[in-house]
Amino acid sequence: MNVGIVGFGSIGTEVGKALINGVEDFSLYGITSRSKANAQERIDKLDKNIEIYDLDNLVDNCEIIIDCAPKEAFREIATKCINKERKLITVSGSGILDNLDLEKLVKTNNSQIILATGAILGLDALRAASESNINSVTMITRKPPNALTNAPYVINNNIQINNLLEPKLIFKGSATDGAKAFPANVNVAAAVGLAGIGADKTNLEIWADPNLKRNTHKVQVNSDSAIFEMSIQNVQTPENPGTGKITGLSVIACLRGLKSSFKIGT
């Protein structure tokens, strides 16, 4: 099956590398990027020939589109995929959260949008718990300050985090508001909200912690079926400290799952 990648930053590049090296049943058709020059520079470093196309070409020629672009591009990408009855795999939980009205169109057009697990864990357990009653979900994200300095919320509110000596709480609110305030940093919060009781009811704290070298997420769930807590420490990608290495790997795992004889988890 032909696969197209939209967005060729740190995540898109990792997914592209994996496809080039071989993922059974899938082949990389090409990519698209808002900056062809930057994309070509990355391609040159891979020492592989990857074609750069426009979005329409990718959607016309690929059964599966992988969205690794900023969330602002999600609606355009999703709409084109839906109209062509393509499968769309995305890591943009916040993109889905902002475009839930597309669900009816997805069903009508026999398409599918799949949210890869990205940098979070335990979504299977959270989805299972949501089949009964969930009383509360709280997510606590802690990141080194350099992973948060470019977040719009930090800049717009003039929050100083560069010379911290101790952890600082920089956001407390719903996952919905957190996803809007930190669109490139907490896609995981949107994913947790979508899998559980909804992003509006999911509590979120974001901390800048100078003692950390890894991005950490803790999710606490209280439900009628189970009370559980999940925690993950993600190794940062070298070029983007706000992104965990496991995010790109989750996309590849998602791809393999589409053709797997055994489906593990929900």
Image: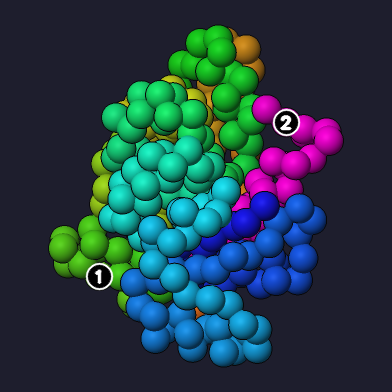
Q: Which residue is drawn at 63% across and 65% down?
A: 28
Q: Residues within 10 Å of mark 1 (few under 14, many from 20)?
A: few
Residue 95 in magenta stretch: no
The amino acid at mark 2 is: Gly
* Visible residue check, residue 24: yes
Please state if 263 lies on the left or on the right of 209 as rendered.
Answer: right
* Visible residue check, residue 234: no
| Placement of the C terminus among the 4 image quadrants | top right
The amino acid at mark 1 is: Gln
Please state the horizontal and vertical placement of residue 106, each as a whole percent of the image.
41, 30
Q: What stretch is highlighted in magenta?
A: 242-266
- Looking at the rendered structure, the number of numbered marks drawn on it comes to 2
Look at the numbered disc 1 and give the secondary structure of its residue: loop
**From this viewpoint, which residue is outermost toward the right?**
261
Q: Residue at x 76, y 59 (%)?
A: 23
On residue 160, the disc is 1
Q: Residue 202's quadrant in the figure?
A: top left
